[in-house]
């Protein structure tokens, strides 16, 4: 298939997911309607969504931060609980990208770029973005638009969906990915219709209101996107598939006004996460620090605590840990139950070389909040720096009994096993770190090395687990290559 044909297919599929696409592609198929709904089961949706997430991890950088992940998941769950699909296990995640974009995939997988959150000014505006994408999922706009032939090969379709995001951020990479993913398979085109968008607006506003947010937030976001398009040479990616018009803004405002008035005060967590992303994504930490100081001095800071937190994080990025520590110590004293401040203070201690103090802070915090992911991640890093491998393994293993171990924890545990001379376990954990980071081939390589060198450990359970996992990942790689 010619690359242009591949791109036409990708553009229209991208529309169904809320991704960026070429505005000149207008190919549409009729709605599949109830027939597609009847044959595309929830299990099918979930399988496609999980395959999609594996592709996303391989192609994009996700924000791997417990504070950000916890807030977005918590907010998403709150909104989903007010939707028509309370039974669906939604997954919310943030892409480390400053552009304005958000998208949904089958099975309840919803992502947004960090830039989208930074474009909002209130929690209700941010929640409206998630509510709109939740509505696309609950109304099954995506599955209605997927042709049965496309659905028959989940790895192929998952790769196509992931290629849309790559193309949104890098056109040349998107073209190469399109050609590689589609190959000679003629994929049918799908797209959101204007009716889909209107329904997502209507349902999303109702979700917002039922979850306790200000339903006017959706119109507020639309206005900001429209303004960004007006003053930017390159319109936000979100507008390519979610066109915002004056009529659409007016309709969103009218729907909100027909609902009972509800004033929602943005939570402190919203401002803290926004401050963290603002510093994290900034190309110039000095400039962000100056902006935060100016906002504080002019009274424009929405949250003084979040403003101070942002200043401290910027100072840490600039290597001024002592100045950051003064701010964070005051925050910890004022807000002793805020784990974000405690974690940042301990991190500043680590960077400045005060390892004993950092260890004490994390230990004291975990005594009050056992198995908290923010503290466990930080404490594990401190224990790793201190060379306390056995304590690190005990900490992460205990956390893993009732929680999912993330990529960073696997990496830290791999380091600990290596120091203890337990190379099989080290390679197995490093493989999981690579896999969760989207580097499938590296994961397979680690497991192959472990499989070839079993003389150091005759533990049948460990070797059997390595062999089984290797077979599983090699099979996944073969499925990808078959495309």
Image (cartoon, grey):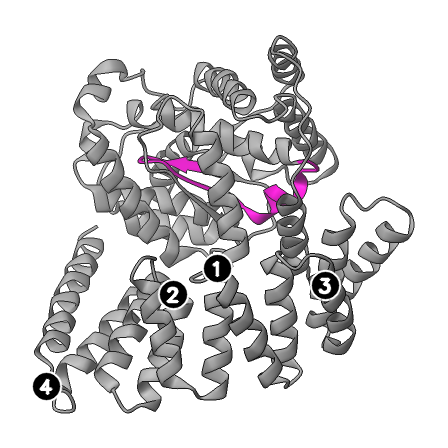
Label 4 crowd bin: few (<14), some (14–19), many (20+), radius 10 Å: few
Residue at 24%, 45% (x, y): give it: 156
Mark 3 or 1 closer to N-term? 1
Depth order, front residue of 269/156: 269
Res. 407 mark: 2
Whether residue 286 is situated above or below residue 214 in the rendered picture: below
Disc 3 vs disc 1: which is toward the camera? 3
Q: Which label's residue is closer to the chain start, 4 or 2?
A: 2
Residue on which the image places disc 1: 64
424 shown above or below 235: below
* Marks 2,3: beta carbons within 8 A: no
In the image, which residues are magenta? 103-122
Observer-side mark, 1 or 4, equals: 4
Marks 4,2: beta carbons within 8 A:
no
Task: Give the quarter of the figure containing the N terminus.
Answer: top left
Observer able to see residue 156 = yes
The residue that disc 3 covers is 333
Along the line of sight, the residue nearer the viewer: 54 or 258? 258
Give the crowd class for mark 2: few <14, some 14-19, many >=20 residues within 10 Å: many
Q: Which residue is mark 4?
A: 458
Q: Are marks 1 and 2 in contact (CB under 8 Å)?
A: yes
Quarter assignment of residue 480: bottom left
Disc 2 to disc 3, C-alpha distance = 32 Å
- Say whether disc 2 or disc 3 marks the residue closer to the N-terminus: 3
């Amino acid at each position: 298939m010619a690359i242009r044909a591949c791109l036409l297919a990708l553009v229209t599929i991208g529309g169904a997911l809320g991704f960026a696409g070429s505005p000149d592609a207008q190919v549409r198929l009729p709605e599949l309607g109830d027939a597609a709904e009847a044959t595309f089961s929830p299990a099918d949706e979930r399988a496609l969504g999980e395959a999609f997430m594996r592709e996303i991890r391989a192609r994009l950088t996700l924000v791997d931060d417990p504070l950000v992940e916890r807030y977005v998941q918590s907010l998403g769950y709150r909104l989903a609980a007010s939707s028509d699909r309370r039974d669906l296990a939604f997954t919310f995640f943030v892409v480390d990208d400053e552009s304005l974009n958000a998208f949904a995939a089958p099975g309840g997988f919803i992502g947004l770029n960090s830039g989208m959150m930074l474009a909002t000014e209130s929690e209700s505006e941010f929640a409206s973005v998630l509510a709109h994408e939740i509505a696309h999922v609950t109304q099954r706009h995506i599955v209605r638009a997927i042709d049965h032939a496309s659905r028959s090969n989940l790895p192929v379709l998952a790769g196509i969906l992931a290629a849309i995001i790559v193309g949104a951020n890098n056109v040349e990479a998107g073209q190469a990915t399109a050609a590689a993913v589609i190959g000679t398979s003629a994929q049918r085109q799908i797209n959101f219709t204007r009716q889909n968008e209107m329904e997502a607006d209507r349902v999303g506003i109702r979700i917002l209101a039922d979850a306790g947010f200000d339903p006017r937030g959706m119109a507020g976001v639309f206005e900001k996107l429209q303004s960004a398009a007006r003053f930017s040479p390159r319109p936000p990616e979100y507008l390519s598939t979610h066109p915002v018009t004056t009529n659409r803004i007016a309709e969103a405002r009218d729907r909100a006004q027909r609902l009972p008035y509800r004033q929602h005060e943005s939570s402190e967590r919203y401002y803290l996460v926004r401050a963290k992303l603002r510093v994290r994504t900034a190309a110039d930490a000095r400039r962000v620090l100056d902006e935060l100081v100016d906002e504080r001095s002019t009274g424009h800071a929405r949250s003084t605590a979040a403003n101070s937190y942002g200043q401290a994080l910027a100072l840490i990025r600039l290597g001024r840990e002592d100045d950051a520590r003064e701010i964070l110590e005051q925050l910890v004293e004022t807000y002793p139950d805020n784990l974000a401040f405690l974690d940042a203070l301990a991190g500043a201690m680590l960077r400045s070389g005060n390892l004993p103090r950092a260890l004490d802070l994390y230990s004291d915090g975990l005594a009050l909040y056992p198995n908290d992911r923010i503290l466990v991640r930080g404490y594990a890093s401190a224990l790793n720096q201190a060379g306390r491998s056995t304590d690190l393994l005990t900490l992460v293993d205990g956390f893993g009994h009732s929680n999912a171990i993330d990529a960073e924890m696997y990496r830290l545990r791999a380091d600990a096993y290596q120091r203890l001379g337990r190379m099989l376990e080290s390679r197995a954990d490093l493989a999981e770190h690579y896999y969760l980071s989207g580097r499938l081939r590296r994961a397979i390589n680690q497991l192959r090395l472990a499989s070839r060198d079993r003389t150091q450990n005759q533990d049948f359970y460990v070797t059997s687990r390595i062999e089984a996992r290797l077979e599983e990942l090699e099979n996944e790689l073969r499925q990808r290559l078959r495309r």
